[in-house]
Image (cartoon, helix red, strand yellow):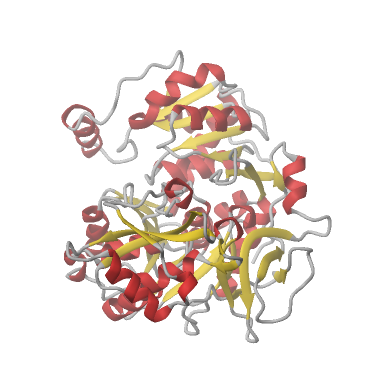
Amino acid sequence: MDVQNSLAEVFEQACDRYTDKPAYSALGHTLSFTELEALSRDFAAWLQNESGLQRGDRIAIQLPNLLQYPVVAFGALRAGLIIVNTNPLYTEDELLHQLQDSEAKALVVLENFAANAAHIVAQTKVEQVITTQVADLHSFPKRLLINAIIKYVKKAVPSFNFRHSHDLREVLYKGESLDLLPLTLAVDDIALLQYTGGTTGVAKGAMLTHGNLVANMHQVREHLPDVFEEGVNTYCAPLPLYHIYAFNMHLLCSMSSGNHSVLVPNPRDLASLIKVFNSYPISGFMSLNTLYNALLNDETFHESDLSHLKYCSAGGMAMMADTSRRWFKLTGCEVLEGYGLTETSPVVTINPFGAVQEGSIGTVLPNTKVKVVDEKGRRLPTGEAGELCVRGPQVMKGYWQRPEETAKVLSLDGWFSTGDIATIDDEGYIRIVDRIKDMISVSGFKVFPNEVEDVATHHPGIVECAAIGVPSEVTGEAVKLVVVSNSPELTVEAIQDFCREHLTAYKVPKIVEFIDELPKSNVGKVLRRELR
């Protein structure tokens, strides 16, 4: 294989190799690798010749999982720009912070979400706004029909007004007649400013280089050669591509191996997600515990065509043992739970295909080193719990314009401190005990929320739950369990009795609260901080 210094090179080589194979589908329309290459080329050429943007400028992409996302993302990378992945559901304040912090000079936004951007864009350095409608890359007349239904029947496009903006279709049309200027990107050039969720304060932009992302792509493919066979698989993509896990799996690993990703714009609409399983020969499903659980609790999914399914993976949050077992019973597929962080591009570990250990996040990827340390940074022996630290080519360059924050987590010799408590066994399998900040201290004894939640979800009356620490005059902190139940008869006492059978007394929830729905992030992570 040719040496690949950048994501642009990876993309162009894949398009040359896989030509007419399907690359991405969304809402019933498919782009081949050849079509994707041409459209991204046109966008890149417009950026270079007409936008006024220079190499290294930031471009924010605020799109859900539509065909426009890979076109715009690969076009931006080929033009030498830095992508700022931006959640379409951001509030005005969240969007303003990200655009100001990144000093983005361009914004690509779906019209459905453009109103918030229109209100704040004058307070940023954004010079170019490119808008697009949901079906802009579909063929005529389906394009017009879908866009008209969304705008005029569903009324899903709030009014907005930018002082000056471009329509993506017009941009692509103009780009067709423009030359794409060749450029050479270095491994140390930044490809993404990937913002963290801001769980410990203001969201920070992790500087992920072309070298970081290319390395992690090859690490994952080497670790999972069966999952990323060349040109034969169709993966369901329900997680948003602006999230680093989905970006890696579907824009890098799937694309570079010539496979087909079916994009799901709104995974909360389970009917549309289930339709994908019945419309395509889905062989791979990359998701997280919340979505696995939701599908298992939907009777129509049990009747879906799962005959092609071979590979399932999970990341982003802990996979509950009960969910894994139920999924295997229904589909015959083990879930390959893995682990990663925004700052590690993102993958650090994955359970190897055919060698899954339940409750483990698997083994480290090639060319990656890990260690577990105590509060003073001393390495701990096998089996002892401590903070997990990572070193490898996928570890970020640092936080954008935040050297002090970078120094807190990234040592001079390249070790990244994850903030997660873990153990490593004799076979190299790693288990995440919990986040350091989520740990509950009951009379000085450590209680890890994941352990309490894993036990509680085995109760047939509990759909999902979250454990948090609350102040206690007696024990300092007490365990509180917030429960979503499918049984009106379920009582607090019944839950506590069930937990008491499986947990030491101080770990048993002292407080149980029933709730209709747990607060979750845009990718379905339970937000314990909001429960607190």
Point out residue 294 in the picture as x, y percentages from the top left corner: 28, 61
Q: What residue is drawn where x is 50% and y is 84%?
A: 355
**In the current view of this chain or complex, which residue is farthest to the right?**
412
- Where is 477 relative to 500, above or below? above
- Where is 153 relative to 280, above or below? above
Quadrant housing residue 321:
bottom left
Q: Is residue 233 left or right of residue 365?
A: left
Q: What residue is drawn where x is 48% and y is 54%?
A: 470
Front residue of this view, candidates 252 and 483:
483
| Residue 227 visible in rendering | no
- Where is 393 relative to 28, above or below? below
Point out residue 457 in the picture as x, y percentages from the top left corner: 34, 70
On-image quarter of the N terminus:
bottom right
Point out residue 100 in the picture as x, y percentages from the top left corner: 60, 27
Q: Is residue 346 left or right of residue 113?
A: right
Point out residue 364 in the picture as x, y percentages from the top left corner: 63, 73
| Residue 480 visible in rendering | yes
Quadrant housing residue 372:
bottom right
